[in-house]
Image: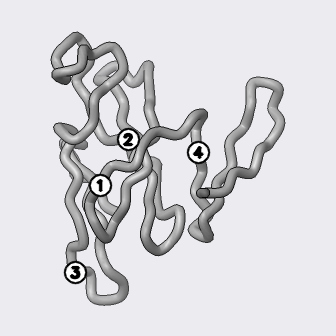
Amino acid sequence: MTVGHDRGEAVFHAFPDGTELYRYGTDRFTPEGADEDGEGEAEPLVDWDGGYLDAANAVILVTDREEEITVPYVVDLPTGAVRGRLTGDPRPHGDGTWTTVGPDARLTLWTLG
């Protein structure tokens, strides 16, 4: 996964040849605080974190310009579909699991299901 310097998109590549698999622009995501047509006060940016959940699914973190709100989205790499949102601040492990740290500092392991 690469994120451009302008943070306007995330691009996923095949390994080892680097072939582009799918490109996700911020126009594919509705930022928090925006209304349903995507308009509103928040301008989305791709966060530097994120990565592969497994070979076919990844997490893209989308944040507002002030980086006050970050929303993790699950994307399906073979089809390019945005599957939905996750809660918390996920750290993907690459095997279909990810961890989050709760407000009580407890670590939780999640599984894609």
Residue 30, x across and y down, in percent: 28, 29
Q: Is residue 92 left or right of residue 57?
A: right
Q: Which residue is mark 4?
A: 90
Q: Secondary structure at mark 2?
A: strand
Callout 4 touching callout 2 (CB < 8 Å): no
Q: Which residue is mark 3?
A: 19
- Please name the amino acid that badge 1 sits on: Ala
Which residue sits at x=36%, y=20%?
Answer: 32
Q: Secondary structure at mark 3?
A: loop
Colour pattern: one colour
In three-dimensional space, the C-alpha distance between marks 4 and 1, rounded to whole angstroms, equals 19 Å
Q: Earlier in the sequence, mark 3 or mark 1?
A: 3
Callout 2 touching callout 1 (CB < 8 Å): no
Q: Which residue is mark 1?
A: 81
Q: Earlier in the sequence, mark 4 or mark 3?
A: 3
Callout 4 touching callout 3 (CB < 8 Å): no
- Please name the amino acid that badge 4 sits on: Pro
- Please name the amino acid that badge 2 sits on: Asp
Residue 64, x across and y down, in percent: 32, 24
Find residue 75 and report its image quarter.
bottom left
- Please name the amino acid that badge 3 sits on: Thr
